[in-house]
Image (cartoon, grey):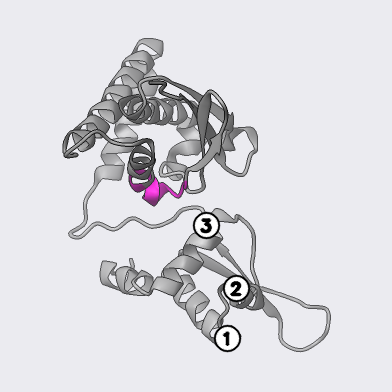
Amino acid sequence: MLHPLKITSTLADETRFQIYDFMLQNKRTFTVQEIANQFQIHPNVARLHLTKLSEIKVVTADFVKTGKGGRPGRLYKATEEGIALTFPKREEPLLFNILLQLVSSLGEEAMDKGKELAYIQGLEEMKGICSRAKSSLTFEEKVNLLSERAALIGYVPRIAEQDTQRIIQFTIYNCPFHNQLPLYQNLICTLHEAYLRGQIDALFSQNEFIQTENMLHKCEHCKYEIHVKRVTS
């Protein structure tokens, strides 16, 4: 098992973290030269960053034949699993799996209760954050709060303007429950969406929350839109 200090020290480098974040959002393989071009750094520097990331297993490095002779090249890709840091070791994932099994075995009634609890959790968390503000939050400040809460699961909200409403579009690149999806995909997605709805309802009293893409339907990412009505004076 990798020591947490090795992981944190590797990702502490700003450029290296940006490279990892970029690869995480673009689910494909990259050559050293592509990363060097993207971040305007020397290929040797790009190779060093990619090697460091592969050492902590957040990036895979596979040899491929170029067809031109010589040494095989390498293709790099962000891993699906990601990493979790606990020090000292915690067993939350074990309890999480047990709870998923329990809810799944109890049927629709348990699912409905789970949705209710997930929604309340998201709602109360965001209300608590908003209550610490010294004045009423602007639309932009609310979007920033949403961005901060979402940073670790990799979505960056984008705003589209219309006459009667604003549309917040965001994409989840790194599902925080990826490891549990094969067995409990419907349950996890339902609870996660209820939690997000709670956060959004706490921020915007009049909104329409829509999922436009879902990883479970062979999409690369989960995409959402939040339609927020303009407040007229």
Seen as rendered, the residue at the extreme front is 233
Of labels 3 and 2, earlier in sequence is 3
The total number of labels drawn is: 3
Which disc is residue 42 wearing?
A: 1
Classify mark 1: helix, strand or loop: loop
The residue tagged 2 is 35
Q: Classify mark 3: residues with Cα within 10 Å, few (<14), some (14-19) or many (20+).
A: many
At x 34%, y 69%, the residue is: 7
Cα distance between the residues tagged 3 and 2: 13 Å
> Mainly helix, strand or loop, the magenta region?
helix
Tell me where residue 214 sits by quadrant.
top right
The residue tagged 3 is 24
At x 37%, y 75%, the residue is: 13
Region of the chain picked out in magenta, as a range: 148-156
Classify mark 2: helix, strand or loop: helix
Q: Classify mark 1: residues with Cα within 10 Å, few (<14), some (14-19) or many (20+).
A: few
Q: Amino acid at mark 1?
A: His
Q: In the image, is 65 to the left or to the right of 22? A: right
